[in-house]
Image (cartoon, rainbow, N blue to C red):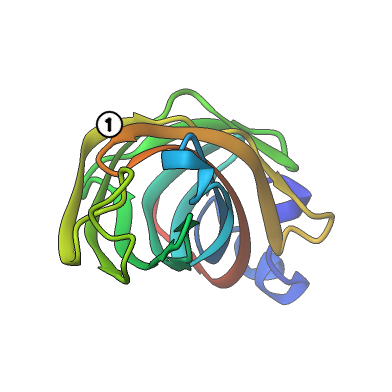
Amino acid sequence: MVALLALPATARAEEPCKTLEVEYVLAGNLRLSDTPMGQGDGTYRIGPGRALIRFEGDRARLLAYTMEQRFTIHPSALFWRASLVTNMHAGMREGATVDGAFDGHIIRWSGGMPYFIDGTMQCTGSLCGKFGAPRSGTSPISIPAYTQALEPFVFSNDGQTFTMQSTPGPHTTSPKQTSEVSVAGREIKRVCVAP
């Protein structure tokens, strides 16, 4: 077993754990570009989220991934102003998994994860419905399922945290935007499981 996943010495003395499931709490940055008139362009904090990863020797498997995306944009154009409140839930499709290779420090994923984004956007103000801004009131947002690319998860020396560099998200027309996301995770729980 790699050093990153080693159990305390007392546990190792009894019997080494060959398969670990580790849960992480996530936070991220969502970078938006190509929004109407550039008014929504920027980087927004998202989270909390959750990831569950199974480690077995030099293999890793992403078993679950969710991320809350709640943020507010304040676009303006000429004499018009608005407040756009986004409240979305994103995550890996239930039952799906993603495999990766683990060298004790980095997980390199073999592919992307089946991903969905659902929620609402609420627009208030005089700009709503103009220049590509959403209509006034609350509108549902549903981005059809797609494969979200994953950059490697790079772990700290103590194995308690990891980061993922920015990776492209979907380009959508309603709302009009291009997205990128970066993520950081912190371990909150680990369990030894039967292989």
Write down the quadrant of residue 139 in the picture.
bottom left
Secondary structure beneath dot 1 equals: strand
In the displayed structure, 92 sits above or below 188; it is above
Q: Is residue 5 visible?
A: no
The outermost residue toward the front is 79
The outermost residue toward the top is 110
Task: Give 105 or 9, whichever is nearer the viewer.
Answer: 105
Residue at 47% in and 40% down: 37
Task: Give 77 or 101, whichever is nearer the viewer.
Answer: 77
Could you tell me residue 11's position as x and y percent? 66, 72
Q: Is residue 8 left or right of residue 42?
A: right
Residue at 74% in and 53% down: 4
In the displayed structure, 87 sits above or below 60; it is below
Residue at 81% in and 61% down: 158
Q: Is residue 2 visible?
A: yes
Could you tell me residue 93's position as x and y percent? 23, 45
According to the picture, the residue beneath numbered tag 1 turns out to be 146
Write down the quadrant of residue 58 in the picture.
top right
Q: Is residue 44 left or right of residue 120?
A: right
For the image shown, how many numbered marks are present on the structure? 1
Task: Give 28 or 119, whichever is nearer the viewer.
Answer: 119
Could you tell me residue 98's position as x and y percent? 39, 35
The outermost residue toward the right is 157
Could you tell me residue 174's position as x and y percent? 25, 40
Residue at 61% in and 60% down: 185
Q: Amino acid at mark 1?
A: Tyr
How would you rate the neighbour count of disc 1 (Cα within 10 Å): few for under 14, some for 14-19, many for 20 or more? some
